[in-house]
Image (tube, grey):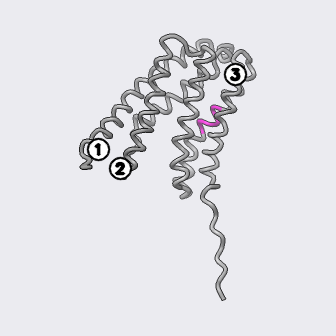
């Protein structure tokens, strides 16, 4: 008589992955709220959701490491969720004219870097090469999320903290500078492996 084995819990529904799913679900909600840029309530609701999504960016990795919930699905979805969150917010903030003029270049640099890094990671994955996240890249992510948070608050935030948008734009430029730095590090690593690839 065969012993009945306990059903293995699906790795898809670990707490770490559920936090990542929550960040993915926040993207269309944030975009929808930012369709009403002049509505104070919508801006603050968007800020609250963005803040929660940004916190899950830290929490999902912490939970995965602490409780041994790391999975291939989580490793795939985590950077995708981050990039979708940042890209959607930057596009909506440009559309509602929170980011205008020369400041658009900071947003363009950040978006282009995300595409560049995604392409490099995909290529290097084929070569079984992993590129660890540097400390500067972590600082870049933190500054970027804080900058976007100020910009999401936008005009509504000005009623509580005058200069909210200017602070957000200043931080966005700092994030763009760090983006160039970290992007170059990824590019240099990618070029090295392309040159060294014997194929």
Density class for disc 2 (Cα within 10 Å; few <14, some 14-19, many ≥20) is: some
Q: Which residues are magenta?
A: 50-55
Q: Residue at x 66, y 28 (%)?
A: 31
Under circle 1, the secondary element is helix
To which residue does mark 1 refer?
Answer: 193
Could you say whether the residue bearing mark 2 is in a helix, strand or loop?
Answer: loop
- Disc assigned to residue 129: 2
Answer with left or right where residue 179 lies relative to residue 153.
left
Which quarter of the rendered picture does the N terminus lie within? bottom right
Q: Nearer the viewer, residue 197 or 148?
A: 197
Q: Are marks 1 and 3 in contact (CB under 8 Å)?
A: no
Q: Is 142 placed left or right of 37 in the picture? A: left
Which secondary structure lies at badge 3? loop
Percent across and percent down for residue 69 are 56, 56
Q: Are marks 2 and 1 in contact (CB under 8 Å)?
A: yes
Q: Is residue 90 left or right of residue 49?
A: left
């Amino acid at each position: 008589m065969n012993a009945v084995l306990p059903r293995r819990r699906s790795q898809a529904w670990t707490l770490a992955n559920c936090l990542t799913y929550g960040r993915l679900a926040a993207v269309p909600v944030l975009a929808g709220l930012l369709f009403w840029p002049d509505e104070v309530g919508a801006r603050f609701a968007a800020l609250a959701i963005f803040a929660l999504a940004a916190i899950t960016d830290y929490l999902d990795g912490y939970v995965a490491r602490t409780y041994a919930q790391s999975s291939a699905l989580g490793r795939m979805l985590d950077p995708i969720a981050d990039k979708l969150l940042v890209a959607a917010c930057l596009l909506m903030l440009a559309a509602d004219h929170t980011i205008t003029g020369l400041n658009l270049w900071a947003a363009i640099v950040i978006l282009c870097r995300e595409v560049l890094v995604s392409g490099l990671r995909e290529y290097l994955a084929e070569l079984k090469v992993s590129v660890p996240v540097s400390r500067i890249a972590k600082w870049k992510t933190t500054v970027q999320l804080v900058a976007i948070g100020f910009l999401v608050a936008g005009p509504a935030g000005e009623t509580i903290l005058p200069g909210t948008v200017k602070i957000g734009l200043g931080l966005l430029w700092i994030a763009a500078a760090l983006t160039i730095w970290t992007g170059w590090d990824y590019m240099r690593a990618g070029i090295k492996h392309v040159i060294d690839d014997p194929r």
